[in-house]
Image (cartoon, grey):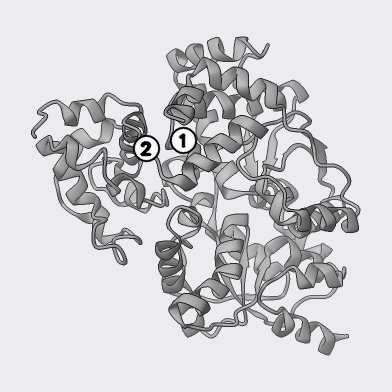
């Protein structure tokens, strides 16, 4: 299985540990990542708020690069995923818009043809690799570690572009449980982390995150598992912000799903990776030591 | 001041169509995570203000900028009214009036100047090296600028400076 690997800008710039875990686990699952040299930012919501045509053209340029490689896109970030998935759907469907966007893209020597699909890492694991293969890759399962799964909004919303062809939250729950962890139920699981307003309105971002964290804390979870780099920052670093400004302390470790799976596959995280988490991973790692 | 065409101005801006279907039921507000914490943010009321034509109460204000684009309202609107989508039309119009928060403007300028909205911290570069991740794939700034000049994005984010 080969994919055009759309890394985006946030992960390599802020969360190299996420990228590292993906690059470690992909080959174990038979997933080959082909670099997208010369790609550009996906044009996330902040950019879409400024201008519509710029969004479609920038996102379409990335889609064209993948078309050039003849490969579906695999992306890790929910914001990149939504931007590319929506643009792909809009331009495949609307010939008039497609012509307009292709006029813009002609200046950079490209044409959108609508020949590829956009997949999240979760789509690839669930639909292409398959749950059985993921389960079989687990060598050191977590024994019932209680995980609050944070799917993030744009893995599943809006339903009209995600449902039907994609399973979303259920898929992620099943993948988490394939590692031997338990995906526990909690209120507001589908609610936003607050991340999109971080850097725009920090106070509101913290308050939205706090609602989510209150609910997770009440559920008795040992840790939070995310797929989106924005959710990760908002819930990990956000706990420090909330402690400082809203005087509430949670001490809930936050892990990328890729890290959880990597550990379950029997690989260890380096000290530097463990220390890159703002909230100590001790509660998660302690279980690992007991097993060994 | 009333502007009777304002609702249609929003409806005719890309992603704004859904406002024509709004029946003021308030399901968007009751499902909005921001409405719980920001009194001023009330998507139903925002739709109402637009339908009433109170343009100057919306576009120069902070009202368009509280939304997280989480799309919860989009899934819950009984009319398929796409409030969360209409928010993009409203923000696009606000930007044309010079109303853009500093955080969004910084991201937009970073995109134009570097091809990306987030650039690496020193810590991240050191981590990348230690993990043996190699060089980041290059971002094609030249292509980004060609596209953004063609769409006049540069004029939106550099005017008045």
Question: Tag 1's secondary structure?
Answer: helix
Q: Residue furthest bottom?
A: A290
The residue identified by callout 2 is: B88
Q: Nearer the viewer, residue B84 or B131?
A: B131
Q: Mark 2 lies on which chain?
A: B
Where is residue A222, by image quadrant? bottom right
Asked whether disc 1 touches disc 2, contact meaning CB atoms under 8 Å apart, the reply is yes
Rendered location of residue B58, percent (x, y): 22, 41
Residue at 17% across, 30% down? B6
Q: Can residue B51 be seen in this view?
A: yes
Residue at 84% across, 48% down? A30
Residue A48 is tagged as 1
Q: Mark 1 lies on which chain?
A: A
Rendered location of residue A282, percent (x, y): 73, 83
The quarter of the image holding the C terminus of chain A is bottom right
Residue at 63% across, 58% down? A227
Characterize the local packing of mark 1: few (<14), some (14-19) or many (20 or more) Cα atoms within 10 angstroms.
some
Question: Tag 2's secondary structure?
Answer: helix
Residue at 61% across, 60% down? A172
């Amino acid at each position: 299985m080969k994919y055009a690997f759309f890394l985006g800008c946030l992960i390599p710039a802020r969360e190299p540990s996420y990228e590292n875990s993906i690059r470690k686990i992909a080959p174990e699952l038979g997933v080959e990542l082909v670099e997208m040299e010369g790609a550009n930012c996906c044009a996330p919501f902040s950019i879409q708020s400024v201008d519509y045509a710029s969004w479609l053209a920038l996102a379409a340029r990335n889609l064209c690069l993948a078309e050039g490689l003849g490969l579906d896109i695999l992306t890790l970030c929910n914001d990149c995923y939504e931007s590319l998935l929506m643009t792909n759907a809009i331009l495949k469907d609307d010939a008039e818009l497609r012509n307009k966007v292709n006029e813009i893209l002609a200046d950079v020597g490209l044409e959108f043809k609508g020949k590829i699909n956009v997949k999240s890492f979760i789509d690839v694991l669930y639909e292409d690799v398959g749950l059985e293969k993921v389960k079989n890759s687990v060598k050191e399962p977590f024994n019932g570690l209680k995980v609050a799964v944070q799917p993030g909004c744009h893995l599943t919303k809006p339903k009209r572009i995600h449902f039907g062809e994609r399973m979303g939250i259920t898929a992620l729950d099943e993948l988490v449980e394939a590692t031997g962890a338990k995906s526990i139920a909690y209120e507001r699981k589908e609610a936003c982390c607050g991340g999109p307003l971080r850097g725009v309105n920090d106070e509101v971002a913290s308050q939205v995150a706090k609602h989510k964290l209150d609910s997770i804390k009440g559920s008795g979870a040992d840790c939070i598992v995310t797929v989106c780099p924005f959710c990760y920052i908002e819930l990990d670093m956000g706990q420090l912000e909330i402690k400082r400004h809203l005087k509430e302390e949670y001490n809930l470790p936050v892990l990328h799903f890729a890290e959880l799976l990597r550990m379950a596959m029997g690989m260890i995280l380096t000290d530097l990776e463990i220390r890159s988490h703002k909230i100590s991973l001790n509660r998660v790692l302690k279980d690992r030591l007991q097993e060994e | 001041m009333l502007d009777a065409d304002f609702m249609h101005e929003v409806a005719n801006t890309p992603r704004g169509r859904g406002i024509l279907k709004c029946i003021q039921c308030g399901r968007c507000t009751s499902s909005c995570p921001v409405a719980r914490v920001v009194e001023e943010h009330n998507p139903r009321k925002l739709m109402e203000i637009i339908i009433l034509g109170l343009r100057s109460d919306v576009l120069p204000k902070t009202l368009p900028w509280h939304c997280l684009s989480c799309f919860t309202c989009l899934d819950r609107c009984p009319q398929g009214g796409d409030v969360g989508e209409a928010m993009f039309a409203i923000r696009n119009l606000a930007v044309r009036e010079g109303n853009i928060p500093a955080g969004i403007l910084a991201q937009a300028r970073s995109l134009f100047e570097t091809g990306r909205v987030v650039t690496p911290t020193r810590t991240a570069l050191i981590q990348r090296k230690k993990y043996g991740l190699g060089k980041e794939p290059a971002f094609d700034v030249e292509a980004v600028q060609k596209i953004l000049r063609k769409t006049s994005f540069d004029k939106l984010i550099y005017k008045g400076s």
